Image: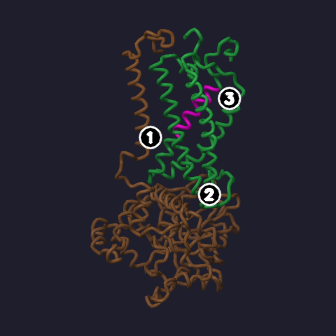
Chain colours: A green, B brown
Amino acid sequence: MNTNVTPERRQFTASMRFLHWLTAALVLTMLGIGVAMVASLASFQTLVSIHRPLGILILLVVVIRYVNRRLSALPPFPATMSSQERFVASASERLFYALLFVLPLVGWGMLSAARYPIVLFGSLHLFPILPHSLMLYAMLRATHTVLAYLLFLMFIAHFGAILFHTFIVRDGMFNRMAPWRVRAENR
Amino acid sequence: MPTETTTPTEKQAAPLITRARLRGLAATGLIILSVVTAFLYLGGWFAPGALTPARFVDGLERAGGMHSGFRRNHAKGVAVSGFFESNGQGMRLSKALIFRTGRIPVIGRFSLSGAAPSVADAPDTVRGLGLLFRLPDGEEWRTAMVNLPVFPVKGPQGFYDLTLASAPDPQTHKPDPQKMEAFLARHPETARAFKIFQSHPPSSGFENSTFNSLMAFRFVNASGVWIPVRWSMVPVQPFAAATPAAAAPGNKNYLFDALIVSIHRHPLQWHLMITIGQPGDVTNDANIPWPVGREQVDAGTLTLDSVESEETSPARDINFDPAVLPAGIEPSDDLLLSARSAVYSESFRRRAGETKESSAITPSEVRQ
């Protein structure tokens, strides 16, 4: 991408933006499925059978995304962000990565501890990563719920922050992560 | 692109509250509120009366009492193990590896229905058999069967209502016959099922009981062709009718004790009989029997040669979730499977974190 040659980078790289929106779609779907399946009798089985492989897909995407993030050049924070805002933004990015990595692992681990087969699709299944232990399962199952609610709150805060910058501060911050390419002179 | 009406960092004199900012604030609030509302909707927050897995298990606990660490239904049980020997006859029906000729390990659990883990054995109490088949490639097939010929109700709501209608009254410790009468008046399908039960009296013990899947499933073969099926474990041990005399008041565990004695004497065997449904046979309602004379395939023999108290067996900590299926066995259009899976999982989640109390069938009771 020729964004590398512009002196002042306005957007994240195309691969970072793609991975961001892919994660957003997967995680929102996952949160919706998660909250619906535990409250549903008739759809439970279908939703669980999507939840498992989708969780593993998110785990893969977040690993790729993290590596890509480390290898990519980043645009600077907009001038409209105070140092406190910048600190919160950086800390929440780290927490997002941590949650997106840990939540699928806790899910995988809790199914292992419950001695459920970890079926992805058809006969394809994963190996257990923890020994059969009900107490371990109980702990991880509760952790899975707590972390998922935390992730939802993080998403709401993140979404609220970008809406705030778009509709109230109006500093064009959304352009940094816009799925489409934004030229410098658009600013 | 929104036009920039103000540049807040540069113009200190710019008013903090502008019409545009208020509109922006309203838009932000509205969008966030809709997203949160959508999630609350998905989570069932706007349907407080709907039957959820949690409310279902609450009902089981209300009807049968709270028993720490035990399954919320079929609480009393004993663990068994053995193997399944396939004769290869099932291969044309399903590509599941269990049907390839050969022997695979099985663990299981015999149980009595109800939430009370120390209930006295009685001939009419519904008997359960949960099985876990470990396939050579690491896949699993789990099934939870009972000795009834059909499911007594239609769907999960019916089962929930039946459980509460037949619950012992806190005053008399006996089911309230008026509640049951009212339930049967509202549920003719249950009255019909009870008539079928009368023509299928229970056998004398676990060892000569037929256990049925009740629900229909789909078998998919190697060519991708699927057929509706139901299955049964049909005992090799000869049928003998239950006698009230056997249920002596002194022995609360007479059914389990007889099972333990007979399994110590010789391995117990069942044939896995696959019943093939025809077009028009009801597959979405386990309450309705299939016509007699449907083709049956004997797919192999289950041998149970070892019995153990739940306290020493991994079976206690296994959820015999009937939705755990290998490739080649798929759910039918009967949503009861999903509901059972959801309720079993919720029961499992609750009991997993609780202190485990000793099983009615103790390790010393099982000793030879």
Residue type at numbered disc 2: Leu
Q: Distance between the Cα atoms at labels 2 and 3?
A: 33 Å
Q: Residue at x 31, y 71 (%)?
A: B180
**Mark 2 crowdedness (10 Å alpha carbons): few <14, some 14-19, many ≥20:** some
Q: Which residue is mark 1?
A: B39
In this rendering, the answer to whether B187 lies above or below B224 is below
Q: Select label 1 or label 2 by which is in front.
A: 2
Q: Distance between the Cα atoms at labels 3 and 1?
A: 30 Å
Of residue B141 and residue A82, the one placed in the foreground of this image is A82
In this rendering, the answer to whether B165 lies above or below B209 is above
Which percent across, then down, holds residue B315? 61, 68
Q: Residue A65: within the magenta?
A: no
Helix, strand or loop under label 2: helix
In magenta, the rendered stretch is A16-29
The extreme right residue here reads A71
Of residue B270 and residue A63, the one placed in the foreground of this image is A63
**Mark 3 crowdedness (10 Å alpha carbons): few <14, some 14-19, many ≥20:** some
Is there one chain holding both mark 1 and mark 2?
Answer: no
Badge 2 sits on which subunit? A
Of residue B111 and residue B338, the one placed in the foreground of this image is B111
Q: Which residue is mark 2?
A: A136
Residue type at numbered disc 1: Phe
